[in-house]
Amino acid sequence: MNPVFKGTLEDRRSGKYIKFTLPATPYEIQDGMERLNCSDLEHLNFEITEYQGYQYLGQYISPTAEGEELQRLNFLAKRLGELDRWQKISFEGMVRMEMYQREEIKLDRLIDLSYSTGSCHVLPEVKTEKELGEFCVQGGYKFDLETLPNEVMEYLDYEKIGREHRIEENGVFTARGYVEQETGIREVSAGRDFTFQKPKYQVLLEMGGEQLELPMEEEALKETYMKDWDREYRCIDCAVPSLIGVINDSGIEIEEINRFAGMLEEVEKQGQMRVFKAVLQASNCRSIEQAEELGGNLEEKYVLFQEKGNPVEIAENWLEEQLGEDTELFSENELYCIGSRYMEKYPTVKTEYGYLQRYDLEPIQPLEEGPETEIGPQF
């Protein structure tokens, strides 16, 4: 799905932030938290910097969302990304109607409006009160004018007719047409749980409008999928979000994806998912086959400095863990020199998830040529 809101996702405790877009899948949010080394959504803050196709919302909603509000904003973004041309006009009209009554619209209300686009009458070809008046007369909405002779019709003040109709019906003009609300607003947000829930699946596929959660037992997969071999699938979420496009471009059979999802489940059970993502990134992995090869024995092969982001912190970690030294005895310059020499002697790779190193201290070789990986705020 195309981005609706572009911005930055920040851990308010550390001040570290990354570029991020909404809507995001559950695993994309989880991945963002891991890249920021943040274990609790309540510590996150999303700030909108760009509105894609919904620029007018910048006048009405707060540009920042924290914790559960981030989940609400993401839910809204997903819905807005699903709207067609007519629904977008309807939604904008309802938003502008709301603003006649209040200065700011809560996200819950915007969610309700986004699911109520069918409650409006939309005239995309009508942009002015004069055009609205002509539509009302010609369409028979002003029944008291139907019996007028044609020679009288040309003297009608269509602009006034349109203005009176708009005021009477509480209609609004948008840049894309005229909107009137005809029925009530659906209450979709009331009672909905917006707390973040980590998915139970490892890979989520969409097939013919249905969703398939993997891994699943082989027999269950046959009963679900094999009934219709002609259905095409599309991966819409994955425990490793960087592999969503890889899965979609691979053309591999669903049984293979199911086996791969099973491997991801084992990696998750071993508590090595973040290490696995770092390995894939450092290795410039570009296929499911490569990912499967790299996913074995992670705990025995790699170490990830999850909270170490510079030579000083690496030196502190090394001195504390390996030598038991009190790091307060060293100046920051000395720690920086020790950390830098350590990184030169024992190769580490900087990834979005931390510094990755092999236990055998051998260099981590990329599988293919690719762009260098950077972390932190890069603009």
Image (cartoon, rainbow, N blue to C red):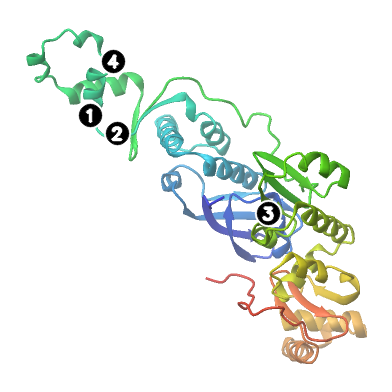
| Disc 2 and disc 4 in contact, CB within 8 angstroms | no
Of the two numbered discs 3 and 2 in the rendering, the one whose residue sits closer to the viewer: 2
The number of numbered discs placed on residues in the rendered structure image is 4
Q: Amino acid at mark 1?
A: Glu
Mark 4 Cα shell of 10 Å, populated few (<14), some (14-19), many (≥20): some
CA gap, disc 3 to disc 4?
50 Å
Mark 2 Cα shell of 10 Å, populated few (<14), some (14-19), many (≥20): few
Q: Secondary structure at mark 4?
A: loop
CA gap, disc 4 to disc 1?
13 Å
Q: Amino acid at mark 3?
A: Ile
Q: Whole-percent x and y of residue 161?
A: 21, 20
Name the quadrant containing residue 91. Answer: top left
| Disc 2 and disc 1 in contact, CB within 8 angstroms | yes
Any mark on residue 29, and which?
A: 3
Q: Amino acid at mark 2?
A: Glu
Mark 1 Cα shell of 10 Å, populated few (<14), some (14-19), many (≥20): some
Say if 336 sits above or below 147 in the image: below
Residue where numbered disc 4 is placed:
141
Q: Earlier in the sequence, mark 3 or mark 4?
A: 3
Residue where numbered disc 2 is placed:
125
Name the quadrant containing residue 220. Answer: top right
Residue where numbered disc 1 is placed:
131
Q: Secondary structure at mark 3?
A: helix
- Quick one: 208 or 88, which is closer to the camera? 208
Q: Residue at x 68, y 29 (%)?
A: 191
| Disc 4 and disc 1 in contact, CB within 8 angstroms | no
